[in-house]
Image (spheres, grey):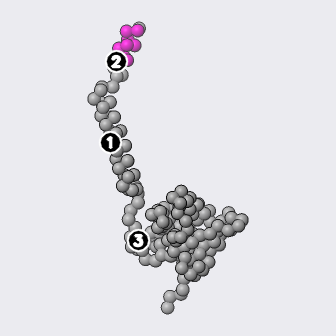
Amino acid sequence: MSHSHAHSHAQEQVPKGALLGIGGLILFSLLLVSAARLTGYRTGEETPSPVMESRELRFDDAAGGVIHVYEWDSGATLATYAPGTENFVRGVLRGLVRERRSREIGGEIPFVVARHQDGALTLEDPATGRRINLWAFGPDNARSFARLLEALQPEPG
C-alpha cells in the first residue's frame, strides 16, 4: 500500500516550468498594478464630457450635526441638512473632508458640483483632484447633489 501512495504523490507534482510560468504571471500582474497606481490610472473612470453647468460649494458642519451648504462666491445658503437626513451627501462629504485632512488641506478651495453634456453629474474636489461620478450611486443619491446645482438659480428669460 505504501508503494501506491508514493506513486500517486509523484503524479500530483507540478512541473517546474508551470510553476515558473505562474510565478511570472503573478510578478507581471503586480508590476502592472504598481505601474497603474504610480501613474494615477483608475479603472472605470472615463474622462467626463464637457461641463454644461457647475457650481462651487462650501460645506459647514454646525452644532448638533447640522450641515449647511453655501454657494462659494455669494455665500448664499443653498441647503441645510438636519441630522439623519441626506445621509449620502453626508457620507460623500465626510470622505472628501477626510482626504483633505490627511493631506493637510484646509477649506480654502471650493468643491464643484457639475452637470456634463452627456448627463453625468460629478462632485469634484480640485484641492485633491478627486472626482466622483454621482450617478454611479443611483438616481436618488445623484438628485441630492443635483438639487444643490439647481438651488437659487435665477429664472431664465
Q: In whole angstroms, how far apart are the C-alphas of marks 3 and 1?
A: 36 Å
At 62% from the left and 66% from the top, the residue drawn is 86
The residue where tag 2 is placed is 10
Check the image and report above or below for 7 versus 64.
Answer: above
Q: Is residue 21 shown left or right of residue 61?
A: left
Provide the secondary structure element on which disc 2 rests.
Answer: helix
> Over which residues does the magenta segment extend?
2-9
Q: Residue 82: percent from the left, percent from the top?
A: 68, 68
Q: Residues within 10 Å of mark 1 (few under 14, many from 20)?
A: few
Does the magenta stretch mainly form a helix, a strand or a loop?
A: helix
The residue where tag 1 is placed is 28
Provide the secondary structure element on which disc 3 rests.
Answer: loop
Asked whether the viewer can see residue 111, the reply is: yes
Q: Nearer the viewer, mark 2 or mark 1?
A: 1
The residue under label 2 is which amino acid type? Answer: Ala
The residue under label 1 is which amino acid type? Answer: Phe
Q: Earlier in the sequence, mark 3 or mark 1?
A: 1
Which residue reaches farthest bottom? 157
Which residue reaches farthest front? 104
Q: Residue 150: percent from the left, percent from the top?
A: 54, 78
Q: Residue 89: percent from the left, percent from the top?
A: 58, 65
The N terminus sits in image quarter: top left
Q: Residues within 10 Å of mark 3 (few under 14, many from 20)?
A: few
At 39% from the left and 52% from the top, the residue drawn is 37
State the residue in front, 114 or 106.
106
Q: Residue 133: percent from the left, percent from the top?
A: 47, 64
Check the image and report above or below for 15 versus 35.
Answer: above
At 46% from the left and 73% from the top, the residue drawn is 115
Which residue reaches farthest right? 64
